[in-house]
Amino acid sequence: MSEHFAYVNGVNICYKIHGKENSYPIICVHGFGSKKETWIAQVGDLSKNYRVIIFDLRGAGRSSRPEEPPYTMEMFADDIKGLMDFLKIKKAHIMGRSMGGMIAQNFVLRNPKKVNKLILLNTSSGMRNKESIELFKRAQIERYNLIQSNPEKVFWRDTRLGFHIKFRKQMEADPKKKFYGIWSVEDLIEYIKTNPSRPIDIKNQAHAIKSHNTFERLHQIKNETLLLTASHDKLVPKFFVEQIHQRIPNSIFKVIDKAGHESHYSRAPEVNKIILDFLES
C-alpha cells in the first residue's frame, strides 16, 4: 500500500489505507515514539473486513514535525478529526494503544458522534506522577542517541519491558523467524532504525502526556468500548486499563495472558480475534 499525505491543521499527516474502499473504516492511533507501522500485525486480519487507516501522528514517522508549539492531546485529537474530514469519513471505529489510547480518549470526548466503537489497548486515563514522565522522556532521548549507533542493543533492551520472558526466548532463538508469518526480530530492528522520533519530538509528545487526564470525564463516554491489556505489562500495568473499564459504562475488559506492553506483536492472533469479535458483536 502506498503512502499518502493529508494537509491537516497546518501539518502534513502521512497515512496508508488497507482494505476495500467501501468497507467500514477503523482508524488506528499509534503510541509514544512510535509510528504507523506499529500496526503491521493487525492490518492483515482487520483489513479483510474493514478499511484500516494507519497514520503517523504529527512529530512522528513521515508526518510533519513542527517544533513549536509543544503538543497537546487536544492537538492530536483535532488532527484525527482533520484526517477524517480530509478522507470524507463521517464516523469510524477508533483504536489507540498506549499514548494512542490516551489520544483516542480525548478524541471521543471531543467528538462522540464521530466514533462508532472505541478500542483502547495498554493505556491509561492519566499519569499521576509527572516526575515519572520526565524520567521516561529522558530515557527515550537516551534511547534515540543509542539507536544511531547500536539499534540492535536498543531493541533487545526494549524487549525486557515489552515482551514476556518466554516470548523473548523464542525471539532470541531465531531472529529471522517470521512470527505468525508477519514479522521477525530483524523487521522490528529495522522499524526502530527508520524515522525515529528525535529528541524534540519526544519532548513534544511527553508534553502532551503530561496534560492528559480524562479520569473524571470517562463516565461521559457512552460509546461501546473494548479495554485490552496484558498480564505482564510493565509500562502501563493492567490496573490502569481496568480503572478505565470501571469508569466507562458500556465497556468490556480483556487481559492477554503471559504478554507485555507489546502484546499486539507477541500475541497478534489472540489480540486480533478479540478486536474482531468486539467489532462484529
Image (cartoon, rainbow, N blue to C red):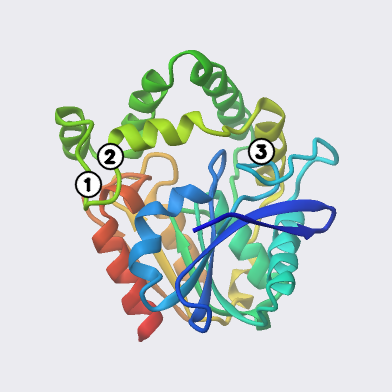
Determine whether 237 is above or below 106 in the image. Answer: above
| The C terminus sits in image quarter | bottom left
Q: Residue furthest front?
A: 2
The residue that label 3 is drawn on is 206
How many numbered tags mark residues here? 3
Identify the disc placed on residue 179.
Answer: 1
Identify the disc placed on residue 232.
Answer: none
Which amino acid, mark 1? Answer: Phe
x and y, in percent, of residue 248 in the image: 52, 74
x and y, in percent, of residue 153 in the image: 37, 18
Determine whether 115 is above or below 213 in the image. Answer: below
Which amino acid, mark 2? Answer: Ser
Q: Secondary structure at mark 1?
A: loop
How would you rate the neighbour count of disc 3 (Cα within 10 Å): few for under 14, some for 14-19, many for 20 or more?
Answer: many
Q: Residue furthest top?
A: 149
Front one among 31 and 123: 31
- Residue at x 50%, y 21% (from the top left corner): 147
The residue that label 2 is drawn on is 184
Determine whether 27 is above or below 147 in the image. Answer: below
The answer to which of marks 2 and 3 sits earlier in the sequence is 2
- Residue at x 66%, y 38% (from the top left corner): 206
Residue 125 in view, yes or no: no
| Residue 113 placement: quadrant | bottom right
